[in-house]
Image: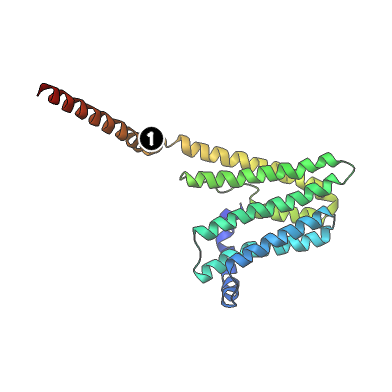
Amino acid sequence: MFDGNFRTAFEKGMAPIGKSLQQAGVSPDAVTGLGVTMAGACGVAIALGQFPLAVLLLLLTGLPDALDGAVAKAAGKSGPRGAYLDSVSDRLSDALLFAGAGWYFAGTDSPHKALLPFGVYIAASLVSYQRAKAESLGYEAKGGLMERAERFIVLGFGLLFSPLFEATLWVMLVLTGITVVTRFVKVWRQASGLPARHQLRTRPSRRRNARPVNDFRQRAEARAEARRRRRSL
């Protein structure tokens, strides 16, 4: 949802800050690494039940995540390498945050509640995976009620109002699950509506696989013909 409505305007607002950081000698990889470090610290704070500190650290996690792309563009280093690193670091950051939440619940009177943040992480990973896989196949899978930016906002709300932390995670799980279903249906419809495209993709590979077989048969027939000629002589 944030991706579709506010991403362009947000990136324009971050561009001057990214340029300033780049001029100061800060690399985009360092900004990404700082975000992962802050996510780990936030996860520890959540695990210890230090929710006010966790809110601050969550903000410090989201800020580098928003700035690394701007720094990369300012440095002219925006490309597949940075996009790959950013994607992997996002998944790692999510894992650290929800692992902290799981640890927190494991130390309560109801340790089985640790499965709740684990379920949210699984759903969030499916949201990200569906987009990555769909785009690798040439489809579009953006959108949904609970993308990464929304997860940060909702998680921050739950940490800020700690008595609602568990309820917030339940809301996040439901909305993330709806996003999973929405993206699946979206990509499924695209894939079902373009059968000819995939036929064109697969046919050349079949011909390529068939060529060695045909060449082998032709060589075998040529050798057999040569033997027959030698015998006739």
Residue shown at 83% from the left, 46% from the top: 105
Q: Is residue 89 left or right of residue 232?
A: right
Q: Is residue 198 left or right of residue 213?
A: right
Is any part of residue 189 visible from this angle?
yes
**Amino acid type at mark 1:** Gln
Which type of secondary structure does the marked residue at label 1 adopt?
A: helix
Q: Is residue 155 left or right of residue 81?
A: right
- Please identify the residue farthest to the left as the structure is shown: 233
Question: Which residue is more in the foreground, 12 or 77?
Answer: 77
Question: Which residue is more in the foreground, 198 or 179?
Answer: 198
Please, is residue 55 above or below residue 131 in the view?
Answer: below
Q: Position of residue 127 (x, y in %)?
A: 61, 45
Residue shown at 62% from the left, 63% from the top: 32
Residue shown at 67% from the left, 42% from the top: 123
Res 83 quadrant in image: bottom right
- Name the residue tied to disc 1: 199
Q: Is residue 206 left or right of residue 150?
A: left
Residue shown at 26% from the left, 28% from the top: 217
Q: Position of residue 200 (x, y in %)?
A: 36, 37
Question: Which residue is more in the foreground, 152 or 91?
Answer: 91
Q: Position of residue 169 (x, y in %)?
A: 76, 46
